Image (tube, grey):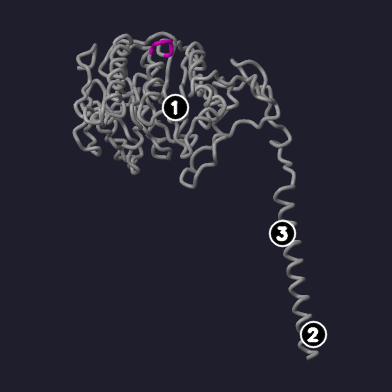
Amino acid sequence: MAPKVAVTEATGRQAASFVLGSVATLTVVLLFQYQTPDYSPAARAPVQFSGSRDQLRCSNGTAAPVIAGGGAAASGGEEANVTGKSPTTAATIKPSQPPAATASPPTPSDRHLPSSTDLEEEGEFRGLAAAVARAAMDDRTVIITCVNHAFAAPNSLLDLFLESFRVGDGTTELLRHVLVVAMDPTALSRCLAVHPHCFLYTMPGLDFTSEKFFASKDYLELVWSKLKLQRRVLQLGYNFLFTDVDIVWLRNPLKHVAVYADMAVSSDIFFGDPDNIDNLPNTGFFYVKPSSRTIAMTKEWHEARGEHPGMNEQPVFNHIKKELVKKLKLKVQYLDTAYMGGFCSYGKDLGKICTMHANCCIGLASKIRDLRGVLDDWKNYTRLPPWAKPNARWTVPGKCIH
């Protein structure tokens, strides 16, 4: 019996040694994981915010972009403004709070794109990366619109645009992901009063404050400058859905964007096939994924301006779209006007419509009047009993809609 006892004791000692060794190893791992200090420069020099609502300065003394909520507390600003409460200001941000979350690292599919660090500090795009990161969805999609003083004024297009998200079907949450690009300081001030995500984008020597008449010199500069900003968003590694501010959102249009598409664009005239290159595009509403192809597309699109003097970006795109598709292997989806409608062509079924665009309509007053009519029709539609909704129709004619 003695040998058995010896074997048993030896086995017990081995088991005890194994347990003690495992505990020691686990202790070391936990110490390294949770107690190792961060000696990186970022940890030694946390960002601090100071100044008023109209301007923030980082700890290095450089001016940060003016963003709603002081440009630092994105989550607080979002909640306050989306729900109608007073917006968060710089004064509500304590020095001990961490800085706002930055953009997540690029996915393997977009590692060839320039990093936000490489692009952030350039001229008119200073602060854009941070603004986009705060507004973006989890899948790195951001909704972008642009306004000047005339469009952002009280009871003008910006108010109608934001109201549509609040009364739409399943669109309220999308407001958190809308970045309003202000083209002048007055528009920025108005944006800050009504929305959590605002970015000031100005061009040296250009004044975008007043209403710009279609095809005027200032109008052309305004619409072409948007394309530069859109390309920068792609270079930062984000999907964007650009929407003109004279569009009301009634349902989520992203549900109709095909997975295969590099670009999905609304249509002035839709012939029934989303892959038909002969559909007439409307670049006041389009979605683009970031890739080397789409960045090259926006670059060539902008450079084509010189070959088509006096034209805005939409007809130029229509002129070069077949060449771009062939050269860059782009996959372009044209969106059905039954879902993404406009005054040029729109679906009569209010049970399908997602967005309505005041295109084929000249003059700010005419756009405002008819878009208000569209929103009133939508509100009446949502109050109808289910059995009556299939018979609902738009109220026509208006100033532009017929």
Q: Which residues are magenta?
A: 152-156
Determine whether the residue tagged by mark 2 lies in a helix, strand or loop: helix
Tell whether 126 sits left or right of 274: right
Relative height, residue 96 to residue 400 (above, below): below
**Residue 124, percent from left and from top:** 52, 21
Determine whether the residue tagged by mark 3 lies in a helix, strand or loop: helix
Going from the N terminus, do you reach mark 3 or mark 1 first? Answer: 3
* Image marks 3 and 1: residues in contact by CB distance under 8 Å: no
**Residue 387, percent from left and from top:** 22, 30
For the question of whether residue 316 can be seen, the reply is no
Relative height, residue 17 to residue 384 (above, below): below
Which residue position holds label 1?
A: 175
For the question of whether residue 64 can be seen, the reply is yes
Look at the magenta stretch and give its main secondary structure: loop
**Residue 77, percent from left and from top:** 55, 24
Give the image quarter of residue 209.
top left
Can you tell which mark lies on residue 6?
Answer: 2
Q: Residue at x 41, y 23 (%)?
A: 145
**Residue 40, percent from left and from top:** 71, 40
Determine whether the residue tagged by mark 1 lies in a helix, strand or loop: helix
* Image marks 3 and 2: residues in contact by CB distance under 8 Å: no
Q: Which quadrant is the C terminus positioned in?
A: top left
Of 41 and 345, the residue lying toward us: 345
Amino acid type assigned to the residue bearing label 3 in the image: Leu
Amino acid type assigned to the residue bearing label 1 in the image: Leu
Amino acid type assigned to the residue bearing label 2 in the image: Ala
Which residue position holds label 3?
A: 26
